[in-house]
Image: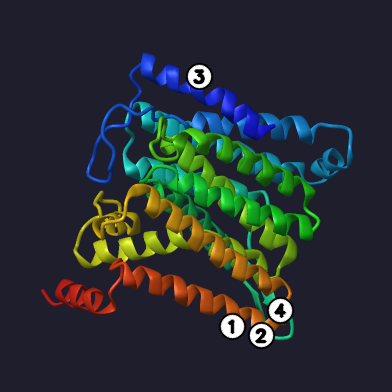
Amino acid sequence: MAFLMAMVITPIVIRFCHRFKLYDSVGVRKVHSGDIARIGGVVIFVSMITLVVIVLFLPNRIGDNFRLVSTKIVAVLACGAMMFVVGLFDDIKSLPMKFKLFAQIIAAVIVCSFGVRIEVISVPEVFSIQFGWFSWPFTILWIVGVTNAVNFIDGLDGLAAGICSIACGVIAVLAFMFGQSVLCVMMLAMAGALMGFLFFNFSPAKIFMGDCGSLFLGFTIASATVMCTAKSQALVGLALPVLALGIPIFDTLFIMMHRFGQRRSVFAADKEHLHHRLLKLGLKQKHVVITAYLVTLLATGAGLFMMAARSVEGVVMFVSILVLLVLMFHLAGAVSVKQLMRALNRKYHK
């Protein structure tokens, strides 16, 4: 239903954008040309929220489970809506990055105050980490980090929407296995909305999700992973979402390290992201996006074996997949330890 709703709403939003000239501006980080509608996040938000609200109030098992965890779910959805509104204002009338970052931190603090926190991560018979008071800064950093990672990766037609739909599918599987039916419904609705939107967002795109879409997506997915991890307390609850979001997470991390070494703002716009580097190597937009999809699917597919593997084997598998992802970034020229060390040396010895 979310998929069908997105398919119906998207053409309406496209016509609305063309009528009121809500186009995505051409910039240093953009690779498109021409007038492309830029508030596609409206489609994702409306399609997902409408279906979730309807299902959550049905007189069935899912509705009953919702009433048991209603405060946490309402907090996540309300703060996700707040991120959507902030992003929508930014799409219509540009907002300062500091304001958006402040809003993300406030939203993360709110969901943390409702008990959505990563307090324990454990691998049976290997280790158990109790975060205690550190669960607050750790969870806030995770939510804000993932939110910005999704926002930064939204640079090619269909890239962010496709990767996030895979991440939603992974979280839905985990939620189902951990008995979190409400979270499973939320992620399936999000995945359906994304796939319906992706029909118009894939290259050549007729509409972009904009900040209203990327901020809402990143925040909701990050909060969902926290809820999943908090319920299971197992490393796999956080490890699989990390693998699903491996490309945007590592891309953001390496970009920030690169900018920091060059004495630039970590939020400065440029064309140093992984997808930009792959384009420079001669790949077309479609090829870059499909490659990102395949890498994400392979990483999460291999990561699913962690659920069947023994504790130590699961940790080794997780680390190995992370190393392979980093290697991919290195081969694409997105990360170089030598260049980073030289940049840091120049930064601190001048």
Q: Residue 120, can we see it?
A: no
Rendered view: 320 above or below 52: below
Q: Amino acid at mark 1?
A: Val
Colour style of the rendered protein structure:
rainbow
Left or right of 127 in this view: 294: left
Left or right of 336 in this view: 162: right
Q: Residue at x 42, y 51 (%)?
A: 289
The label nearer to you, 4 versus 2, is 4
Distance from disc 4 to disc 2, alpha carbons, whole Å, reads 8 Å
Q: Residue at x 76, y 45 (%)?
A: 182
Q: Residue 128, can we see it?
A: yes
User: Which residue does the numbered mark 1 point to in the structure image?
Assistant: 316
Q: Position of residue 311 (x, y in %)?
A: 70, 81
Instruction: Please tell me how crowded label 1 is: few (under 14), some (14-19), or many (20+) other residues with Cα within 10 Å.
Output: few
The quarter of the rendered structure image containing the C terminus is: bottom left
Contact (Cβ within 8 Å) of mark 2 with mark 1: yes
Q: Position of residue 184 (x, y in %)?
A: 73, 48
Q: Position of residue 62 (x, y in %)?
A: 83, 42
The label nearer to you, 3 versus 2, is 3
User: Which residue does the numbered mark 2 point to in the structure image?
Assistant: 312
Q: Amino acid at mark 4?
A: Ala
Left or right of 278 in this view: 313: right
| First-in-chain label (4 vs 3) | 3
User: Which residue does the numbered mark 3 point to in the structure image?
Assistant: 12
Q: Residue at x 71, y 79 (%)?
A: 309
Contact (Cβ within 8 Å) of mark 3 with mark 2: no
